[in-house]
Image (cartoon, rainbow, N blue to C red):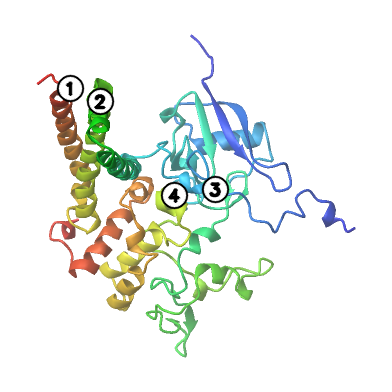
Amino acid sequence: MSATDELPGTAEREQPGPIRHKGPGPAESGWVDPRGRGHGGRALALHRVTGLVIVAYLYLHLGVLSMLLIGSSAWGSFLSLVTAKGFLALEVVLIAAVLFHGLNGIRVALVGSGLAVRRERAMFWAGTVIGTAAVIFAALHILGAL
Amino acid sequence: MSTEQESRRFRVYRYKRGDGGERFDEFDVPVGAHTTVLDALRWIKQHEDPSLALRHSCLHASCGTCGMQVDGREALACVCSVQDHGAQITVEPLANLPVLTDLVVEMDGFFARFPHEHPIIRSSGSPAEGDDGEAHLEGDHEVALDLPSPVALHHHPHHDRHRAAPPAVDFVRLEDCIECGLCLSACPVAATSHDYVGPAALAAAERLLEEPRGVEREDVLAWASRPEGVWRCHVGFECTRACPADAIPAERIMALRRELMFGGPDDEESER
């Protein structure tokens, strides 16, 4: 055995070192981590999350509609369930997700095509204000305060 | 009058090959009003643990070698004040690049994002003695394509670590960029796509549109429009936020997209 073989780390010298990633898990989760992110990174993460929520809702919606095949009694009992306050609150969350995804999508489309790049921050905050106002209005309307 | 020295607790990422994997070590470091993270790390190295490895050079945000993550955000340690952070400061190496040891990452991973056909990879020319005894630029240094990438240059026989400094003909620079790698570390897309060439390479390409220096615009745009180019960006603007040199990589990527889609700069954007 040569002297260099005895040095610590000699055997591992040619192996690549670990790659640090943001996020709670593997590299693919890096976009989720809000640590150190600005409005753009957080908007990107929320855009992806709301996109997944909307797709999940689409499939759920199609599944629920299939209850019509069972009969009017099944549909009636389901309606009484979804008009409860708890389910209506979830509807407000869904509206918030759709509004964020849509408004941020307009911002991403405009900025991502090279238009109004310098106004991307202003568009983000304008969308946030408009979306928040719309969600408050929808919540008051759906929950019966209006 | 109190003479008690203010201090911060540093959680420092540690990794040595063959030394049991990754871990964080904690150090209490005395700090002052102007102490930077780099000052603190050098204090640790001098007073607590000489084995702590870090890379730095100029101490004034010019060389780009001391890039790291401080409390999860990319920064040049030499200009990152500890006063902007809390009682405990977590220091990690840059993300998305392989760690060599402790806070030092392998920058080949950054330069590998510049494929050899990147239009900005070119010889800078070298002075050569002419018959008149004066220095002239050797060769056609406007030729931009089909030259070796920095990675290839790094492994060039002339760059053998036991030899003297490489000849000037091999120097390659990315204009408007200090090559610190902070943008690549901050980019959410680079974490999930090793094919994505990244903000620095795209910003360098857009720079060529502003100042072509003999490079064909069509070559730049053709390179940028490949699947692993501008269309991989998801408009997070984290690269611009991280960039210590104000190279505005995200804005340059959007300018490339606009050029590709509409064939010219926006009047508003061209005013910058």
| Residue A70 visible | yes
Q: Which amino acid, by three-letter code, is at mark 2?
A: Ala
Q: Position of residue A134 (x, y in %)?
A: 14, 32
Check disc 4 and report the residue beneath it. Answer: B182
Question: CB atoms at circles 2 and 1 under 8 Å apart?
Answer: yes
Which of labels 3 and 2 is toward the front? 2
In whole angstroms, how far apart are the C-alphas of marks 3 and 1?
59 Å
Circle 1 sits on which residue?
A: A143
**Residue A55: x and y, percent?**
31, 45
Number of residues whose C-alpha sits closer than 10 Å to that of mark 4, classed few (under 14), some (14–19) or many (20 or more): many
> What label sits on residue B56 in the rendered view?
3
Instruction: Residue at 32%, 74% (x, y): give it.
Output: B222
Q: Are marks 4 and 2 on the same chain?
A: no
Q: CA distance from mark 3 to mark 4?
A: 14 Å
Residue at 28%, 38% (x, y): give it.
A70
Secondary-structure class at tag 1: loop
The subunit letter for the residue under badge 3 reads: B
Which residue is denoted by mark 2 in the rendering? A89
**Residue appearing at x 41%, y 58% in the figure:** B198
**Disc 4 marks which amino acid?**
Leu
User: B200 or B153, which lies in front?
Assistant: B200
CA distance for labels 4 and 2? 42 Å
